[in-house]
């Protein structure tokens, strides 16, 4: 059956009868730039639908089915469809139109996937974890430091489908940057995949630079004079946020290595070399995260050691004062007993003498403890 026949068949499917209407949702709403969250079309899963020819944006790319028909009829260019958190029903028509694998479709709709790259025939499916630094006035035991999301990318011979989950990770700047370089966009869908990967990793670098300030603040607080009084919950919370960042960044290393080294039909060999640069940047981020993790462990151990030293110091002070108080307690206890024949009981200066002995003993003990650092 011809391509046009397949498209007509898809348009008549019961489950995707509204596909043409879905494709025209972007026609009913003005095109928006998701780099401005206030203008994000939260009521629609369709962010943008654009057809490119020789790297140039075509004005007739608002209808999904028509764009695909024109692209496949001329066998030139590609269609870039952008979606934001589509439901299973909304994505069903797109999956039928582009013949996407059911497993990849399931991962796309339900999200919460690890970074990966999978091949389903001539279609490449990639998952990237996006990371955003959450601004906060002061790091506390409940502060959120990083927020994660996901970007799924389907790359075919003549199409790119991006599905974004989360409030951040907008691809508006990526699209604008590519459209400003038509010669780069003319390389095909693989150029879009590289731009997205590069954008995601660049965000990782920005997040790690911001986290460095939090790390410096924690380190400064712990090693200050009041370091033993620092809430350990702050350090544990920061470590948990680092773990979330680590889960988003570290697993991406293997997919980038695959994109950079293994031959793929969907990735032009010229574009493939650029993934090596992205992989190098990712290695830098991974090294920073490992360094942060090791440093947090060291800070936590140092804090626990400070608490132990402070507790030992307090115990020595308590013990020293208890020893000083024991002298008058002992003497007063002895002379408080009702015996007749006790020494110096009937002397005129017996009472002042006993007080002098008590005071002298306490002073000597106090000076001895001070000399030894117990007080």
Image (cartoon, grey):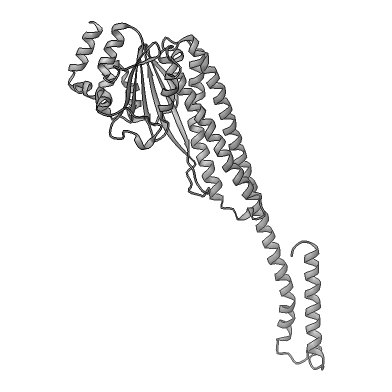
Residue 220 location (% of width, % of height): 64, 47
> Quadrant where the C terminus lies?
bottom right
At x 41%, y 32%, the residue is: 35
Q: Is residue 303 visible?
A: no
Task: State how many labels appear.
Answer: 0
Residue 366 location (% of width, % of height): 77, 70
Which of the 4 image quadrants contains residue 149? top left
Q: Is residue 88 visible?
A: yes
Choose between 245 and 357: the one closer to the eye. 245
Residue 336 location (% of width, % of height): 70, 86
Does residue 308 sit above or below 69 in this rendering?
Answer: below
Which of the 4 image quadrants contains residue 21? top left
At x 81%, y 72%, the residue is: 364
Does residue 344 sit above or below 194 in this rendering?
Answer: below
> Quadrant where the N terminus lies?
top left
Q: On the rendered structure, is 177 left or right of 15?
A: right
Choose between 73 and 243: the one closer to the eye. 73
Residue 258 location (% of width, % of height): 49, 16
At x 51%, y 28%, the residue is: 202
Choose between 14 and 173: the one closer to the eye. 173
Which of the 4 image quadrants contains residue 32? top left
Does residue 176 sit above or below 342 in this rendering?
Answer: above
């Amino acid at each position: 059956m011809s391509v046009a026949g397949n498209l007509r068949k898809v348009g008549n499917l019961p489950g995707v009868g509204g596909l043409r209407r879905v494709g025209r949702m972007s026609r009913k709403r003005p095109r928006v730039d998701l780099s401005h969250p206030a203008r994000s079309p939260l009521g629609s899963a369709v962010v943008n639908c654009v057809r490119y020819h020789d790297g140039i944006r075509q004005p007739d790319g608002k209808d999904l089915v028509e764009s695909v028909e024109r692209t496949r009829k001329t066998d030139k260019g590609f269609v870039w469809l952008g979606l934001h958190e589509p439901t299973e029903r909304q994505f069903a028509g797109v999956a039928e139109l582009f013949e996407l694998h059911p497993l990849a479709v399931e991962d796309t709709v339900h999200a919460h996937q690890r970074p990966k790259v999978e091949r389903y025939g001539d279609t490449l499916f990639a998952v990237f974890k996006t990371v955003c630094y959450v601004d906060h006035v002061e790091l506390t035991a409940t502060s959120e430091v990083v927020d994660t999301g996901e970007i799924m990318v389907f790359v075919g011979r003549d199409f790119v489908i991006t599905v974004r989950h989360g409030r951040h990770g907008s691809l508006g700047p990526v699209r604008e940057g590519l459209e400003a370089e038509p010669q780069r966009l003319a390389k095909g869908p693989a150029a879009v995949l590289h731009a997205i990967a590069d954008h995601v990793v660049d965000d990782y670098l920005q997040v790690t630079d911001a986290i460095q300030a939090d790390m410096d603040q924690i380190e400064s607080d712990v090693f200050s004079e009041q370091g033993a009084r620092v809430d350990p919950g702050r350090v544990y919370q920061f470590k948990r946020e680092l773990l979330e960042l680590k889960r988003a960044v570290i697993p991406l290393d293997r997919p980038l290595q695959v994109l950079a080294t293994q031959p793929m039909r969907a990735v032009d060999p010229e574009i493939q070399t650029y993934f090596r640069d992205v992989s190098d940047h990712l290695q830098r981020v991974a090294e920073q995260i490992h360094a942060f993790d090791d440093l947090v462990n060291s800070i936590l151990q140092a804090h626990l050691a400070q608490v132990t030293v402070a507790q030992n110091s307090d115990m020595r002070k308590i013990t020293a004062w208890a020893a000083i108080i024991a002298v008058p307690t002992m003497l007063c206890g002895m002379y408080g007993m009702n015996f007749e024949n006790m020494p110096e009981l009937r002397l005129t200066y017996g009472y002042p003498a006993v007080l002098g002995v008590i005071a002298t003993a306490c002073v000597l003990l106090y000076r001895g403890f001070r000399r030894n650092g117990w007080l």
